[in-house]
């Protein structure tokens, strides 16, 4: 363990009282909980059934309602609690003969007949005359009308809609146990297609397309960024050319320019290139370098042993060969950092795609996800959270895999101070 | 000679890149700010008309107030919270890595996702925030009822609709969620403070707070200034979060900020000249705030090397 790792303490790095250390841990654990709450809330919501997302007060563990329907125990949706005595009947004649129906008990007259409803042109209307019915089950006031739960989007979703089973059960027959609704994730992916507007162009652009678009932009940006920034940073660190210092000062200065301040003219630059409505504004600039990455790499290169470069020069290596055979092998961590940061930046980007992308078939995941808002009938929060989890997961996995590279990079970020 | 030409050659992508994608847009927006200009028609020189129109633009002044209020709130909050976290992390030996990983996690969540998650947290009916504070409010209600049995149901406390009642605090919370990165930078710097300084302070009988006040803070003051300036630039260009959480700019434009106003002016109202003038005001505001940060810190920042 290096000397640095042993140092700690509020003011001093020497041993301090256990009470103080304990208090510090308490503060940190509380802060960690607060920082994790939104993520846990997202994870929890993403695995809940729709009705539980609206429960009051909010609950953390996703739970399913279970009930036996026709002898089979299954996950159900509590549709409504009966406010009057009802009965399940099977009509013996008429248009809906043989089907199970839930009607008010008072609708069945003394002779065992009832007026049944049937579907005409999409609307439920009463038949002309009462028909004899068989009472299958009594459902007193207070019973729950429950329906079999099924994923909203399954392969045979029309079938699942019509063949869902239902029943009336007393409160005591319902049980509630923890259950993770992983099907929400698939439904969220289906939602991203823009269901409800199935005109071909829209429907074709679904999650796979958004993912492919996003990855394409990310990969092109990463390759371009690493290649260009390495060369430029190398020239800043080890080569001389007229105007080098001025260019370096400008490089630091442009980091101060906020994107909204150049948004308008940059849009016009891309428009004059004919790039609006294509991916080019999102990846081509990376191939010309980025101020922050160039700065980071230059600082890293300056820390490399210079005699290696001189030795390579004496051996007759060209500058490009030096970069490839000396600099790149020695700078793997720094280059990995640039690649990671660029990947994350492109993956997360929202404003760029929003300004430059017009056609839905070119949407990135960011834009696809935005579609969860302002859908008719409110935001489906459980799907929005599921989609958010899937969108964030790759970055979190990447971060945990390359934690050291990350942390070193973030610490380097502060080097300018 | 070969190195000279290689240098220019290697730097060429960036010379082109910085010119085309940064310097030219930056300078041309200065020119555009003196013109009337929509995408469809070429710019027409109008002199200072845009700026005098901005001076009379009530929306602009409101947007400016919002932007300044949010910036000051978030910058101060970020300094206090991230420094506090870093100092506390530095006070423990075990678990530093785990703590910093957890504090950094929110930074990895794509902006669209964090905006959606926080909107859901702020949800008035079934959001987490109201779920957490409602028990406290109900306790308050029952106490009030015991004093005043005639309390009307309308007067009872309940969780607010955060987005319309407290728009700035929504964005403040969201932005404080992301201070983990800054805290980590501070932690790295805290480890560079020479041990001898603490020893010397201890010999002089300094208390814990005196050591923080007179040793730690001065030693890391340059990075505090640096992070503050980066914070100013970051917060002043915050676009995605307000854009998604307050698509219409909030109730009475209470959550409408300069970047969104620039965006709307340029791409919805097609007034690119006016938008360019606004963006220069944004840039000048960043410069002024940065200058202010330097001014405040002038006698307080200690440069060990200088």
Image (cartoon, coloured by chain):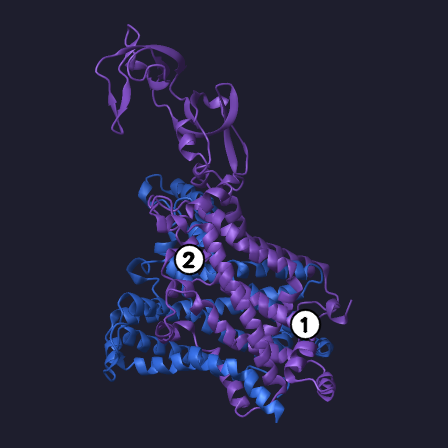
Looking at the rendering, which quadrant does residue B146 occupy?
top left
Residue lying at the far bottom in this picture: please name it. B1
Single out the residue that lies furthest toward the top: A111
- Quarter of the picture containing the N terminus of chain A is bottom right
Q: Local crowd at mark 1 within 10 Å, few (<14), some, or many (≥20)?
A: some
Would residue B259 be found to the left or right of residue A385 on screen? Answer: left
Q: Callout 2 environment at 10 Å: few (<14), some (14 to 19), or many (20+)?
A: many
Report the chain shown in blue. Answer: B
Residue B154, given in percent of the width and then of the height, sits at 31, 43
Q: Position of residue B17 (x, y in %)?
A: 47, 79
- Which chain comes out purple in the rendered image? A
Q: Is residue B8 above or below residue A341?
A: below
* Residue ID for mark 2: A363
Q: Nearer the viewer, mark 1 or mark 2?
A: 2
Numbered disc 1: what chain? Answer: B
Give the quadrant of the C terminus of chain A.
bottom right
The secondary structure type at the circle numbered 1 is loop
Q: Which residue is mark 1?
A: B191
Disc 2: host chain: A
Q: CA distance from mark 1 to mark 2?
A: 44 Å
Q: Residue furthest right?
A: A1
Quadrant of res B156 = top left
Identify which residue is drawn at 43% across, 74% down.
A258
Q: For mark 2, give the secondary structure.
A: loop
Whole-percent x and y of residue B103? 58, 60
């Amino acid at each position: 363990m290096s000397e640095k790792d042993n140092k700690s303490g509020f003011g001093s790095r020497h041993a301090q009282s256990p009470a103080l250390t304990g208090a510090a841990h308490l503060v940190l654990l509380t802060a960690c909980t607060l920082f994790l709450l939104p993520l846990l809330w997202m994870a929890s919501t993403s695995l809940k059934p729709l009705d539980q997302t609206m429960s009051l007060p909010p609950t953390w563990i996703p739970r399913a309602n279970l009930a036996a329907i026709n002898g089979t125990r299954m996950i159900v949706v509590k549709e409504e609690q009966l406010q009057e005595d009802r009965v399940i009947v099977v009509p013996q004649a008429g248009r809906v003969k043989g089907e199970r129906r839930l009607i008010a008990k008072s609708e069945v007259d003394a002779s065992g007949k009832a007026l049944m409803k049937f579907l005409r042109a999409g609307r439920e209307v009463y038949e002309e005359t009462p028909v004899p019915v068989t009472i299958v089950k009594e459902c007193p006031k207070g019973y729950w009308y429950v329906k079999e739960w099924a994923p909203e989007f399954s392969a045979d979703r029309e079938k699942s809609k019509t063949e869902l089973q239902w029943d009336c059960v007393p409160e005591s027959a319902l049980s509630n146990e923890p259950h993770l609704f992983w099907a929400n994730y698939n439904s969220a992916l289906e939602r991203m297609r823009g269901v409800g507007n199935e005109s071909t162009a829209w429907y074709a652009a679904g999650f796979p397309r958004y993912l492919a678009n996003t990855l394409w932009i990310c990969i092109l940006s990463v390759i371009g960024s690493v290649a260009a920034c390495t060369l430029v940073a190398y020239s800043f660190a080890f080569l001389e050319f007229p105007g080098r210092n001025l260019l370096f000062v400008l490089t630091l200065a442009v980091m101060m320019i906020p994107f909204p301040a150049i948004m308008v003219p940059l849009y016009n630059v891309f428009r004059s290139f004919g790039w609006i409505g294509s991916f080019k504004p999102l990846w081509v600039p990376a191939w010309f370098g980025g101020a922050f990455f160039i700065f980071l790499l230059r600082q890293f290169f300056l820390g490399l042993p210079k005699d290696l470069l001189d030795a390579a020069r004496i051996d007759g290596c060209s500058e490009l060969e030096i970069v490839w055979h000396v600099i790149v092998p020695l700078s793997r961590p720094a280059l990995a950092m640039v690649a990671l940061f660029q990947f994350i930046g492109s993956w997360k980007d929202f404003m760029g795609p929003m300004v430059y992308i017009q056609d839905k078939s070119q949407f990135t995941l960011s834009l696809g996800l935005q579609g969860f808002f302002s859908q008719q009938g409110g935001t489906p929060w459980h799907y929005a959270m599921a989609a958010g989890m899937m969108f964030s997961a790759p970055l979190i996995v990447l971060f945990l895999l390359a934690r050291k590279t990350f942390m070193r990079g973030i610490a380097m970020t502060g080097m300018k101070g | 000679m070969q190195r000279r030409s290689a240098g220019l050659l290697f730097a060429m992508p960036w010379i082109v890149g910085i010119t085309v994608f940064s310097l030219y847009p930056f300078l041309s927006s200065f020119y555009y700010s003196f013109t009337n200009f929509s995408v469809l028609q070429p710019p027409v020189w109008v002199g200072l008309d845009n700026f005098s129109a901005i001076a009379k633009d009530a929306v602009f002044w409101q947007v400016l107030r919002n932007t300044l209020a949010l910036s000051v709130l978030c910058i101060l909050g970020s300094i206090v919270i991230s420094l506090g976290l870093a100092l506390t992390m530095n006070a423990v030996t075990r678990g530093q890595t785990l703590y910093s990983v957890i504090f950094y996690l929110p930074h990895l969540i794509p902006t669209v996702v964090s905006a959606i998650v926080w909107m859901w947290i702020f949800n008035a009916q079934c959001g987490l925030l109201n779920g957490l504070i409602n028990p406290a409010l109900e306790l308050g209600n029952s106490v009030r009822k015991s004093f005043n049995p005639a309390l009307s149901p309308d007067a009872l406390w309940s969780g607010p609709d955060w987005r319309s009642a407290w728009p700035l605090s929504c964005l403040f919370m969201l932005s404080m969620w992301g201070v983990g990165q800054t805290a980590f930078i501070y932690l790295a710097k805290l480890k560079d403070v020479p041990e001898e300084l603490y020893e010397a302070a201890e010999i002089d009988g300094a208390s814990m707070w005196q050591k923080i006040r007179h040793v730690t803070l001065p030693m890391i003051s340059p990075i505090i200034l640096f992070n503050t300036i980066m914070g100013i630039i970051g917060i002043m260009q915050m676009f995605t979060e307000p854009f998604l959480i307050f698509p219409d700019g909030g109730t009475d434009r209470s959550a409408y900020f300069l970047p969104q106003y620039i965006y709307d002016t340029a791409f919805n109202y097609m007034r690119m000249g006016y938008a360019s003038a606004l963006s220069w005001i944004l840039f000048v505001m960043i410069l002024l705030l940065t200058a202010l940060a330097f001014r405040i810190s002038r006698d307080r920042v200690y440069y060990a090397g200088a």
